[in-house]
């Protein structure tokens, strides 16, 4: 059974490109356009991996990550943040919120798949 990924980004283009690449690599991908939509989707489905943008309207990625980390149901969820914010402070803030990996956009599909496989094997 393929791992289920919830991909969250406010850019339809990013969602389309990443969904295509992840699907071609054998992952089952659902998408959300912001953190609120993602939380709503997570109420009804168990995901293995959350990949989220940081800067989004309605609910940003850091708030989403902190909220998800507070839910017992998702304690073991792998979380990867994707952001254009690349300063050490931004990465530290992401780690403090609970991300397993903080990757700077643009990220190649090969790098993203490698990170997913590395995190999944540590599980």
Image: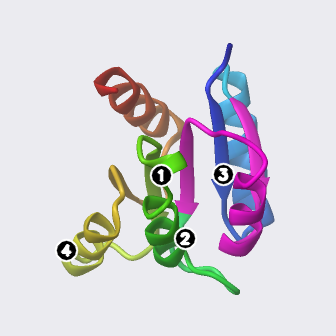
Q: Earlier in the sequence, mark 1 or mark 4?
A: 1
Is residue 120 placed above or below 35 in the rendered structure? above
Q: Which mark is residue 88?
A: 4
At a point 47% along the width and 39% down the height, the residue shown is 112
Residue 72: give its label: 1
Number of residues whose C-alpha sits closer than 10 Å to that of mark 4, classed few (under 14), some (14–19) or many (20 or more): few
How far apart marks 1 and 3 lie (CA) works out to: 20 Å
- The residue under label 3 is 7
Q: Are marks 1 and 4 in contact (CB under 8 Å)?
A: no
The reply to whether discs 4 and 3 touch (Cβ–Cβ < 8 Å) is: no
Residue neighbourhood size for the residue with mark 3, other residues' Cα within 10 Å, grouped as few (<14), some (14–19), many (≥20): many
| Magenta stretch in the rendered image | 28-52
Q: Secondary structure at mark 3?
A: strand
Q: Position of residue 15 (x, y in %)?
A: 73, 55
**Distance from the alpha carbon under mark 2 to that under mark 4:** 20 Å
x%, y% of residue 68? Answer: 51, 61
Q: Foreground mark, 1 or 4?
A: 1
Per the image, label 4 sits on a secondary structure element best described as: helix
Q: How many marks?
A: 4
Sequence-wise, the earlier of marks 1 and 3 is: 3
Instruction: Point out the image quarter for the N terminus.
Output: top right
Q: Nearer the viewer, residue 52 or 70?
A: 70
**Which residue is denoted by mark 2 in the rendering?**
64
Q: Are marks 2 and 4 in contact (CB under 8 Å)?
A: no
């Amino acid at each position: 059974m393929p791992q289920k990924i919830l991909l969250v980004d406010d850019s339809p283009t990013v969602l389309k490109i990443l969904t295509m690449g992840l699907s071609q690599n054998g992952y089952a991908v659902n998408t959300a356009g912001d953190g609120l939509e993602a939380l709503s989707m997570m109420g009804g489905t168990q995901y293995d991996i959350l990949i989220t943008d940081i800067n989004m309207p309605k609910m940003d990625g850091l708030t989403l990550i902190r909220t998800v980390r507070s839910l017992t149901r998702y304690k073991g969820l792998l979380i990867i943040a994707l952001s254009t914010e690349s300063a050490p402070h931004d990465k530290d803030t992401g780690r403090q919120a609970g991300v397993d990996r903080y990757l700077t956009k643009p990220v190649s599909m090969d790098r993203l798949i490698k990170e997913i496989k590395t995190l999944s094997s540590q599980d």
